[in-house]
Image: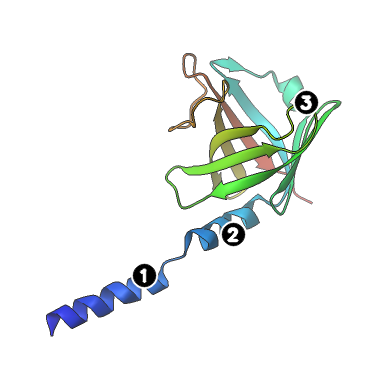
Amino acid sequence: MRWHLATALVAGCLLAADSPDQVAKKDIEKWQGAWRAVSMENNGKLTPSDALEKIKLTVTGTDYHFQNGAFNEHGSYKFYAAKNPKELDIVVGEGADKGKIYLAIYQVDGDELTICLDSANKNRPREFTGKAGSGCVLEVWHRVKP
């Protein structure tokens, strides 16, 4: 009798849990809209605030448009939201880097988005850091309110 009860409880928990696709879909919804860069640290070097003002990100579905002054890039995201930390593949859709995939991790907390990637793009980071010696870029974005 206990075995049947335990099996029923486990089955109920599995049915209640979100699938990886459902988790990714929820995170994709959190990314929608326009974002402005508020902090970027590349291997210990902070991006000056006047340069940050030129950096924008717009996300529609899984597509992105990144702007840094006159530089524009379009591409798409592939989310692995069930991972810990959450993982992201950034797929460049145009230009000299078309098809290149950047391996990143991310977190979304309300209207703040944090992305971390290895500047050499050899490994996916395991922690959120842009400190000197890390080889990583740590980006913090705030949602632009309409």
Q: Which residue is mark 3?
A: 96
The location of residue 83, given as percent across then percent down, is 44, 48
Secondary element type, mark 3: loop
The location of residue 51, given as percent across then percent down, is 75, 21
Q: Relative to 86, say whether 44 is above or below.
A: above
Secondary element type, mark 1: helix
Q: Relative to 7, say whether 23 is above or below.
A: above
Q: Are marks 2 and 3 in contact (CB under 8 Å)?
A: no
2 or 3: tag closer to the N-terminus? 2
2 or 1: tag closer to the N-terminus? 1
Mark 1 packing: few (<14 Cα in 10 Å), some, or many (20+)? few
On-image quarter of the N terminus: bottom left
Distance between mark 3 and mark 1 Cα atoms: 45 Å
The location of residue 132, given as percent across then percent down, is 49, 14
Residue at the spot x=27%, y=80% of the render? 8
The amino acid on which the numbered mark 1 sits, given as a three-letter code, is Leu
Q: Which residue is mark 2?
A: 25
